[in-house]
Amino acid sequence: MNWLMVALAVTKLNGVYVLPAQPELREYTTFELQDATWRDDGETVIFSYLLPEDMTGRPDYVMTMIAPSADRAREFFHMVCHQTGTTAQCSTRGTSTACVLRFEGLGIEAAAVNQFLDKKYGVSPTTELRKEGAAMLLGDAIGTLSLTPRTEP
């Protein structure tokens, strides 16, 4: 039996996603990404992370985007999620990457998000602001993403 060994470079990332919003909603449209990583096998870079549960109403929504490894090595590159059609235009300077993401076809249901937020935070004016922030991700939302390598293990 022949096994093909592929070197896979994995980089854990710190990431912050921001949806543009009016001042009173900014706190509820800025999210730290969980479990964000680059995986590079020399041909393809896979960027994956958990979408924040406060935006999706569920704790397990994994977003996976890809780009050719050669493109990722450039200062400007493009990533795409083939499952949803979400795209990202990115720029790298040193070890930092900034992207403009256009989310499409996420299949997030407002009622499920609202129910999740009510259960997690209780019914309150603050929860209503969280719902307004989460509603901005419905449809074709555009936001920014900042990524840096994680320094801790």
Image (cartoon, helix red, strand yellow):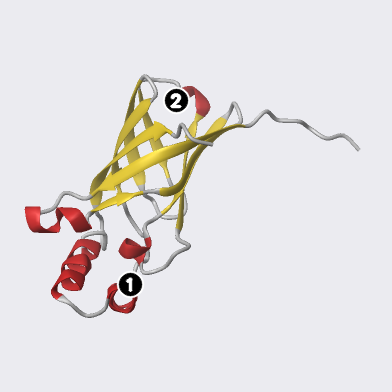
User: Residue 139: where, in percent of width, then height?
Assistant: 26, 61
Q: Is residue 36 left or right of residue 145?
A: right
Mark 1 to mark 2 CA distance (whole Å): 34 Å
How many neighbours does mark 1 have within 10 angstroms: few (below 14), some (14-19), or many (20 or more)?
Answer: few
The residue that label 1 is drawn on is: 109
Dot 2 amino acid type: Asp
Dot 1 amino acid type: Glu
Mark 1 element type: loop
Is 90 placed above or below 31 here? above
Relative depth, front residue between 76 and 27: 27
At x 59%, y 26%, the residue is 42
Is 93 placed above or below 131 here? above
Question: Which dot marks residue 75?
Answer: none
At x 39%, y 51%, the residue is 85
The residue that label 2 is drawn on is: 71
User: Residue 58: where, in percent of width, then height?
Assistant: 41, 68
At x 40%, y 39%, the residue is 14
User: Residue 37: where, in percent of width, then height?
Assistant: 49, 40
At x 36%, y 69%, the residue is 57
User: Residue 51: where, in percent of width, then height?
Assistant: 39, 55
Is 130 placed above or below 86 here? below
Q: Is residue 105 left or right of residue 2?
A: left
Q: Is residue 42 left or right of residue 152?
A: right
Q: Indicate the quadrant where residue 89 lies.
A: top left
